[in-house]
């Protein structure tokens, strides 16, 4: 009896259970696809780096596109010593920071009131906010152009061909979506939490600043990342609303100044794109930890 | 002075009535439990006392003042929620002191009150932890601590033990009772669990369908329920109900349950029950604990009878026996050594001092 039990023991241990095996298969396939995706998405930046390190003559010679034979930092030096590129960079940076600030100042209180303070028409309004986001910006830039011209005529404030005017324009893209994300986040916070705060003596402002903001931090960071990315990479509006070289932002500036007629300065274009992609990358890397950390854990049961 | 009074309190959600005009007086330092099945309006009533729910009609008075339009923070109440509702980003200390800090209480006063409450609840060593580092029972204590430090006029508990496992629930129940004995604050406690209601309350308020069925001490409700609902809701296992007819023969009354089974009505009840002789739709009610095994000496009004057992459930300290009377299952509680077995015949005794006769149409206990 005991002998047969011993015989079964090691055999059962040697053969992995079907659950274990299927888990291993699932992991294996996840890795295969993760690696494929990583290669696919990392190829453009790697290509930009390689091209940025080549001289124009090496690029023109059409040598192996994945190898640099005579690496040089000339392209980057030229970019950083040209005031134009630095101006584009500064314009983009100031706009992005200002737009993020304005967006959060509008979206967070809007989402709090729409998502939490039930009032007549709040649901309809919330849906309306989302519908605004669904209208593509390619449909809006002509009416917006008209409005800016009209503002100039009536008030004398020139909005066209001024980079700072984009600070007013971009929130039309970012605010609806960020409000929508934040509504979702605020609604996921258990209702008892604001009731407890209400009984503890908090007003709505204190409830927002002391309870909702800290608890919804992951959502706020998600919205911040979105607003920053949109204003950093927006192409159509700055293309339409700014003309003079010193008023351009990065995406428009790169293509309009580094392509001269039919001469494509590929080395500098690639280098400029790579440098331009750095700030969002740094911000993502910095905020990801906060983003992933689930702060609502422990608020209620579970 | 912190009694709570409800006057003709009504709550409608759109057109659906949730609370239908209830009156209730809760005296200072009293522990009152609102109990009833889900949807009976007990939580809505509590939330109206808290000010979290608008009042459709009637008045809520706290300490003699009408507070219908007073916001929750100015009602001087504290509430403990079913899912604790601790602020996840704050430590236990910060959670407990949040209300005091909002009121700009001096720091040393806050520290004194928090440490005092932490001592009562035995959570002094948890003050630096975050809620997610705590177990369910500890979170529940912190939630109670948050209520105690505020030193409010009234404590409101909204099913505070429902999220805990059975063992912890019993432990925390005792804990809540001890805390109330120490701080003596007027308490309104909502639960759907009649055992919790019976064990904790000075007075129990049984609610059903937005109305109060009965208010009374736990013993009142158990021994003299006023309605069939209360009779069936309080007590576990629940009271047996069997349709019956009331007969009169030679001046004595009998309750007939079936052709074979009829019980004599005790002398002291005959005058009370006589008007109902021959009337239809009567229900006979008797708790399982009043159906026992045959004993050598029968006391007054104990009547023996014999049945064929359907199912038996040994519980250790007692055995529950089930048998059928005209298709209705009846439960009795017998001594585990009385030899009750599934399908066997057994001699039982009904203690008729504790019978209830119910008019099935009005639901009133006669």
Image (spheres, coloured by chain):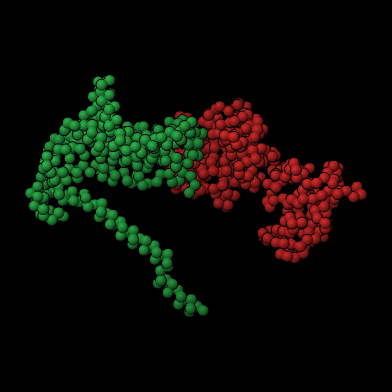
Chain colours: A green, B red
Q: Is residue B235 visible?
A: yes
Relative to B247, is B103 above or below? above
Left or right: residue A139 versus residue B323 is left
Left or right: residue A15 versus residue B113 is left
Residue A83: give x, y in percent of width and height. Answer: 13, 35
Q: Residue at x 76, y 62 (%)?
A: B308
Left or right: residue B84 versus residue A26 is right
Residue B88: give x, y in percent of width and height. Answer: 44, 42
In what quadrant of the picture does the N terminus of chain B appear? top right
In this view, the residue in front, A32 or B72, is: A32
Q: How many marks?
A: 0
Residue A106: give x, y in percent of width and height. Answer: 36, 32
Quarter of the image for residue A171 reads top left
In what quadrant of the picture does the C terminus of chain B appear? top right
Q: Residue at x 36, y 47 (%)?
A: A292
Relative to B106, is A153 above or below? above
In the picture as drawn, the residue positioned furthest to the right comes out as B250
Quarter of the image for residue B349 reads bottom right
Q: Residue at x 69, y 51 (%)?
A: B238
Q: Is residue B302 visible?
A: no
In this view, the residue in front, B366 or A237, is: A237
Q: Residue at x 25, y 23 (%)?
A: A152
Residue A43: give x, y in percent of width and height. Answer: 22, 52
In this view, the residue in front, B30 or A59, is: A59
Quarter of the image for residue A231 reads top left
């Amino acid at each position: 009896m005991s002998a047969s039990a011993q015989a079964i023991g090691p055999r059962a241990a040697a053969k992995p259970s079907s659950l274990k095996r299927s888990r291993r298969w699932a992991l294996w396939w996840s890795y295969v696809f993760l690696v494929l995706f990583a290669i696919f998405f990392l190829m453009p930046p790697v290509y930009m780096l390689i091209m940025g390190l080549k001289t124009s003559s090496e690029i023109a010679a059409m040598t192996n596109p994945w190898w640099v034979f005579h690496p040089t930092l000339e392209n980057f030096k030229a970019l950083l010593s040209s005031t134009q590129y630095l101006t584009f960079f500064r314009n983009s940076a100031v706009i992005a920071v200002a737009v993020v600030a304005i967006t959060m100042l509008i979206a967070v209180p809007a989402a709090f009131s729409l998502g939490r303070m039930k009032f007549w028409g709040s649901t309809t309004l919330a849906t309306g906010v989302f519908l605004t986001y669904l209208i593509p910006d390619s449909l809006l830039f002509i009416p917006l152009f008209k409005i800016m011209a009209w503002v100039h005529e009536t008030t004398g404030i020139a909005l066209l061909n001024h980079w700072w005017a984009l600070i007013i324009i971009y929130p039309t893209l970012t605010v609806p979506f960020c409000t929508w994300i934040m509504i979702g986040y605020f609604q996921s916070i258990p209702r008892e939490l604001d009731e407890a705060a209400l009984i503890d003596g908090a007003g709505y402002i204190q409830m927002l600043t002391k309870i909702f903001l800290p608890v919804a931090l992951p959502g706020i960071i998600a919205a911040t990342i979105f607003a920053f990315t949109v204003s950093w990479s927006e192409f159509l509006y700055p293309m339409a609303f700014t003309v003079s070289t010193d008023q351009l932002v990065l995406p428009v500036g790169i293509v309009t100044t580094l392509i001269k007629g039919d001469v494509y300065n590929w080395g500098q274009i690639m280098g400029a794109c790579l440098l331009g992609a750095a700030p969002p990358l740094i911000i993502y890397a910095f905020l990801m930890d906060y983003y992933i950390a689930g702060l609502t854990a422990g608020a209620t049961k579970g | 002075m912190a009694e709570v009074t409800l006057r003709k309190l009504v709550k409608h959600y759109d057109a659906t009535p949730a609370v239908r005009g209830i009156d209730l007086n809760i005296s200072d330092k009293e522990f009152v439990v609102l109990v009833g099945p889900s949807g009976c309006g007990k939580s809505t009533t509590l939330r109206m006392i808290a000010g979290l729910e608008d009042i459709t009609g009637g008045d809520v008075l706290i300490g003699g003042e009408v507070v219908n339009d007073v916001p929750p923070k100015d009602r001087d109440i504290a509430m403990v929620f079913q899912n604790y509702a601790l602020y996840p980003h704050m430590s236990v200390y910060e959670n407990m002191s949040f209300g005091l800090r909002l009121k700009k209480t001096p720091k040393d006063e806050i520290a004194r009150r928090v440490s005092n409450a932490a001592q009562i609840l035995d959570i002094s060593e948890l003050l630096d932890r975050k809620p997610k580092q705590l177990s369910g029972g500890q979170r529940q204590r912190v939630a109670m601590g948050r209520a105690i430090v505020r030193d409010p006029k009234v404590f409101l508990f909204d099913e505070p033990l429902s999220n805990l496992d059975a063992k912890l629930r019993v432990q925390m129940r005792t804990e809540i009772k001890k805390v109330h004995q120490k701080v003596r604050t007027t308490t309104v406690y909502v639960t759907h669990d009649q055992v919790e209601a019976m064990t904790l309350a000075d007075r129990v308020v049984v609610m059903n369908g937005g109305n109060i069925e009965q208010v009374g001490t736990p013993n009142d409700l158990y021994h003299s329920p006023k309605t069939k609902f209360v009779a069936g809701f309080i007590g576990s296992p629940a009271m047996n109900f069997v349709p019956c007819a009331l007969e009169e023969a030679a001046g004595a009354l009998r309750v007939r349950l079936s052709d074979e089974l009829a019980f004599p009505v005790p002398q002291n009840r005959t005058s009370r029950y006589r008007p109902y002789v021959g009337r239809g739709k009567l229900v006979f009610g008797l708790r399982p604990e009043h159906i026992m095994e045959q004993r050598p000496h029968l006391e007054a009004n104990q009547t023996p009878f014999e049945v064929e057992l359907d199912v038996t459930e040994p519980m250790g300290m007692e055995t529950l026996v089930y048998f059928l009377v005209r298709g209705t299952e009846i439960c009795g509680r017998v001594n585990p050594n009385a030899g009750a077995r599934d399908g066997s015949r057994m001699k039982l005794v009904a203690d008729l001092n504790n019978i209830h006769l119910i008019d099935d149409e009005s639901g009133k206990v006669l």
